Image (spheres, grey):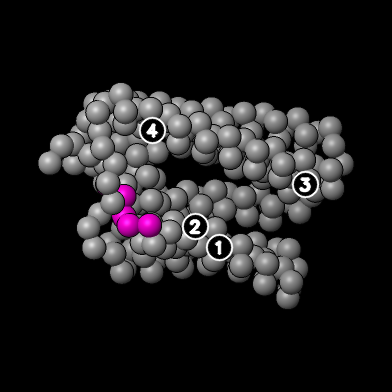
Amino acid sequence: MPEHVEFPRPLRLLWTITWSFAESAGFPLGALAVGAWLYGRDAGLLAGLAATWLTALIRKIATGSVPSLLTITAVVLTLQTAMVLATGQVWIYLLQFPAANLIMSVLFARTARGPHPLVARLAAEVVALRLTSHHPGLHRFFQGATWLWAGIFLLLTAGLGVLMVTEPLKAFMALSTVVTVGLTVAGIGVSTLWFWSVLRRCGLRLRFASV
């Protein structure tokens, strides 16, 4: 069989992606929302943090490892919660948003030149991508895509930092959401098109895993 990259079959792929984001975002946000609704902002933050670390602990016990996306969420949410609870001031609360993106930028950048770029690990965990061989073209793609996301998060850090000091709270929350979603969608689109072009250039085939 020629060299190829392998994804799970469509329904399995959808389940894998859904579960990955549920672990790293759905459970923490759900716990945060319930905690904040019942007991206030600080309780919500602590509930979201507890849900994240509990999920990571269960994952570690059940499978022996913790997915990278869940690890990133745990680290970022821990630092965010510590910053917010440190003083309770509004500017500290807002600072968590650019600070979280700066952490993400550093996490991506520090792995980009190594043998295990973070985008490759996330592709294996979030969409269950499997390779039949360690193709050098794909490895270069994963390194480049990791640098791309490090740059996106650094750009978000700068953009949210500017918004934090120039806009009132409500405007900052709205604009930061638009900017974050816009850059994230753009990054996913560029990464996907880049990935397909690398597959064609390297002569690699895409196939779904057998049942």
Q: How far apart are marks 1 and 3 (CA)?
A: 20 Å
The vertical placement of 187 against 211, above or below, is above
Q: Distance between the residues labelled 3 and 2?
A: 22 Å
Q: Which of marks 4 and 2 is nearer the N terminus?
A: 2
Q: Which of marks 4 and 1 is in front?
A: 4
The residue that mark 3 highlights is 173
Query: Which residue sits furthest left?
Result: 1
* Residue plotted at (31% across, 50% down): 7
Horizontal side of 153 relative to 129 (left or right) equals right
Q: How crowded is mark 3: few (under 14 residues within 10 Å), some or many (20 or more)?
A: some
Mark 1: amino acid: Gly
Q: Decide: marks 2, 1 in contact (CB < 8 A)?
A: yes
Horizontal side of 86 relative to 17 (left or right) equals right
- Asked if residue 66 shows in the view, the reply is no
The vertical placement of 22 against 137, above or below, is below
The residue that mark 2 highlights is 21
- Choose top left, top right, bottom left or bottom right for residue 27: bottom right
Q: Which of marks 2 and 1 is nearer the N terminus?
A: 2
Q: Which of marks 3 and 2 is in front?
A: 2
Q: Nearer the viewer, mark 3 or mark 4?
A: 4
> How many labels were placed on the picture?
4
Residue 173 percent coordinates (x, y): 77, 46
Q: Decide: marks 3, 4 in contact (CB < 8 A)?
A: no
The residue that mark 4 highlights is 196
The residue that mark 1 highlights is 26
